[in-house]
Image (cartoon, rainbow, N blue to C red):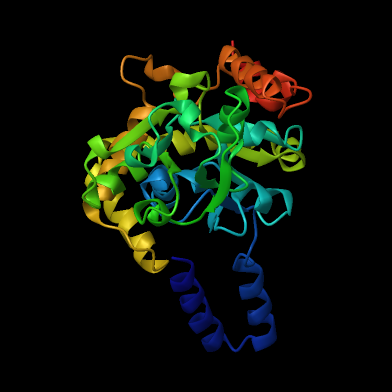
Amino acid sequence: MLIDIASQFAAWMGRSGAPRGWLAGILLFAVPAAGAGEGPIPVNLALQWKPQSQFAGYYLARDKGYYREVGVAVSFLHANTDRGSLQMLSAGEAQLATAALSDALLLAPRLVQIAQLLRRDSNLIIGWKDMGIEQVNDLDGKPVSYWQGVSTTFEAFFKLHDIHPIAIPQYYSINLFLERGVAACAAKEYNDLHRLWQAGIDLEQVTVFKIRDYGLGFPEDGLYAEADWADRHADLLAPLRQATLKGWRYAQAHPEEAIAVVMAEARQARIPTNLPHEQWMLRNVLEAIFVPGEDPGVAGSLSESDFHTATGTLQSAGLLAEPPDFARFAPLEAEAP
């Protein structure tokens, strides 16, 4: 409408013989300057790994405009074997990051939690029976591969059970385990367990240890902010939680669309995956966020009891010297009625 009015006004001014400079000044005054007003705050969100259904809700919160609705323009960084999401946060490359609760606690008070997404632990250790892995103690002295830099839960597991494996770095896949290069490997229930099936491994051939059955059953993935950024943008923390949960609820209601978004992200990043695997992952991740039988209203929150269980366990394992203050670590929980 502004363009039409300006054109008509220009035509009228031309007929009237008014000076062109005066006309230009009027039009410059009438048209809003580019960038006038406050736009969304640009933010880098570092995700724990390559594109996969573990992050479907974040992708959808961006694509559906939920983050922009709360005043944030989110761009994603993906972790790799050299740099984890919390390393990117600490280095200032990202203002937000996803991370396991156990890993995040070791970096407090340099970060604060915005949302606790995965409300139950999905970590596994899988061992070959014919390589002598039948009981937990059988892992002692055996080559076990697990992720480096994001291994707090596994380190705690080994220390609490007095197990001293030969630690082998685990990278993108569990292929080293599948090729029988190690006796056991770290795995995720929502990810690598399905990879075993796809590789044609009979589960009778392996022993599966669920970490949560061995005293480490506390929540896993959460959304975190660098502490100084969180202090400067305290008014954004609750809206960011709600926008993220909105993305995950959309994924829950529209799983086929969510998978399509994930597959597109994986193709763009040239990450090999397949539809059945991403469907399996999304279904299991959603069940860890919106736990069946739980009050839907607790999604995204961290209970003080879970916090103290996690910090107490990490202290017992000698990995955490002093637990952070709960109100500082999870300010949205401290503000809750």
Residue 208 placed where, x, y %?
36, 32
The image quadrant that residue 270 belongs to is: bottom left
Residue at left 36%, top 45%? 192
Horizontal relation, residue 235 to residue 100: left or right = right
Q: Nearer the viewer, residue 215 or 127?
A: 127
Residue at left 32%, top 55%? 261
Quick check: can you spot residue 216? yes
Residue at left 55%, top 37%? 240
Horizontal relation, residue 303 to residue 3: left or right = right
Q: How many discs appear?
A: 0
Q: Nearer the viewer, residue 226 or 322?
A: 322
Residue 111 placed where, x, y %?
71, 37
Q: Nearer the viewer, residue 322 or 37?
A: 322
Residue 313 placed where, x, y %?
63, 20
Horizontal relation, residue 279 to residue 3: left or right = left
Q: Quadrant of the N terminus?
A: bottom left
Horizontal relation, residue 292 to residue 300: left or right = left
Q: Quadrant of the C terminus?
A: top right
Residue at left 54%, top 47%? 147
Quick check: can you spot residue 119? no
Task: Give the answer, above or below, for where 13 lies relative to 158.
Answer: below
Residue 322 placed where, x, y %?
78, 23
The image quadrant that residue 206 belongs to is: top left
